[in-house]
């Protein structure tokens, strides 16, 4: 499944309506058991997302601004913790700004995060990978869709895997990195307990013994 972002004039800036639409889409996908992998893709040439819509924010009072930023945080959290494996396809250097940097301190060092936030400095894909901000960077191709092709390649690797196991692995990782090791192991146990009774687990073991590709159904 692909989520296509095409707010061309605003460069996919996260305005109020756009955020609400994204929240609705992510919520719908998260509750759809048929969806196994989600790719977020920009249809705006050379741009993934410009961050918060500052033109809209300029018209907000303090209360409205606080609620708006809260909505952005909620959307980012919703995407990060959605059941499916979300893959974000980006086509340009990252420019942290209002609304685009809430998760930076957790993903990179505090000093690096402050540098990017305070200076608004763009970083290339290679720099972002070196910082730990992204886990993969690819050279651009002539058609300008190298990141999208790489995302598709990864999605096709994830797609054949057991859906419930993938979801539980993601949940264990997302929740586990936020707590101490003992709590993380407890979370992992809870998640795996939800995999044990599935038919897919039995199918995976049978396929291994019979030396054949597994056929997972998500049950």
Image (tube, rainbow, N blue to C red):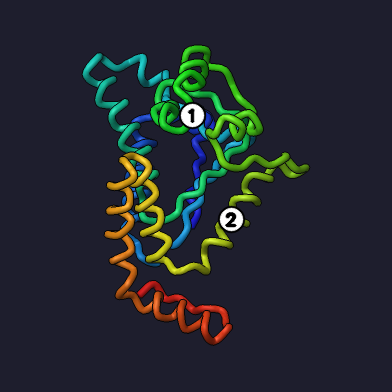
Q: Is residue 149 left or right of residue 58?
A: right
Q: Residue furthest left?
A: 63
Dot 2 and dot 1 residues touching (CB under 8 Å): no
Quadrant for residue 29, please give it: bottom left
Q: Quadrant of the C terminus?
A: bottom left
| Relative vertical location of residue 83 with respect to residue 9 in this rendering, above or below | below
Q: Is residue 132 left or right of residue 67?
A: right
Question: Dot 2, how many residues are within 10 Å of its Cα: few (below 14), some (14-19), or many (20+)?
Answer: few
How many marks are shown on the rendered structure? 2
Give the residue drawn at x 32%, y 72%: 196
Mark toward the viewer: 2 or 1:
1
Q: Which mark is residue 66?
A: none
| Relative vertical location of residue 146 with respect to residue 106 in this rendering, above or below | below
Q: To which residue does mark 2 refer?
A: 154
Q: Position of residue 105 (x, y in %)?
A: 42, 27
Quadrant for residue 146, please give it: top right
Q: Position of residue 88 (x, y in %)?
A: 52, 44
Q: Position of residue 137 (x, y in %)?
A: 64, 40
Of 28 and 108, the residue lying toward us = 108
Mark 2, secondary structure of its residue: helix
Question: Dot 1, how many residues are within 10 Å of its Cα: few (below 14), some (14-19), or many (20+)?
Answer: some
Q: CA distance from mark 2 to mark 1?
A: 23 Å
Of 121 and 53, the residue lying toward us = 121
Q: Earlier in the sequence, mark 2 or mark 1?
A: 1
Q: To which residue does mark 1 refer?
A: 108
Mark 1, secondary structure of its residue: loop
Quadrant for residue 190, please give it: bottom left
Q: Position of residue 60 (x, y in %)?
A: 29, 17
Give the residue drawn at x 41%, y 21%: 98
Q: Residue furthest right?
A: 142
Give the residue drawn at x 31%, y 41%: 180
Q: Residue furthest front?
A: 182
């Amino acid at each position: 499944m692909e989520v296509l972002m095409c707010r061309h004039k605003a460069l996919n800036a996260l305005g109020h309506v756009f955020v609400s639409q994204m929240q609705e889409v992510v919520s719908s996908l998260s509750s759809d058991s048929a969806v196994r992998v989600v790719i977020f893709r920009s249809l705006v040439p050379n741009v993934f997302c410009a961050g918060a819509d500052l033109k809209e924010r300029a018209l907000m009072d303090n209360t409205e601004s606080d609620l708006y930023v809260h909505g952005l945080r909620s959307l980012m959290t919703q995407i990060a913790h959605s059941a499916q494996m979300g893959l974000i396809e980006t086509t340009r250097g990252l420019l942290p700004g209002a609304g685009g940097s809430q998760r930076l301190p957790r993903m990179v060092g505090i000093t690096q995060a402050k540098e990017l936030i305070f200076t608004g400095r763009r970083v290339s894909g290679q720099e972002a990978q070196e910082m730990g901000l992204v886990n993969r960077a690819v050279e651009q191709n002539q058609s300008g869709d190298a990141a999208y092709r790489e995302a598709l390649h990864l999605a096709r690797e994830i797609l054949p895997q057991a859906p419930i196991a993938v979801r539980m692995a993601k949940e264990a990782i997302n929740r586990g990195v936020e707590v101490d090791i003992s709590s993380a192991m407890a979370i992992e146990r809870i998640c795996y307990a939800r995999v044990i009774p599935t038919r897919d687990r039995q199918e995976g073991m049978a396929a291994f013994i019979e030396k054949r590709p597994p056929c997972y159904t998500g049950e």
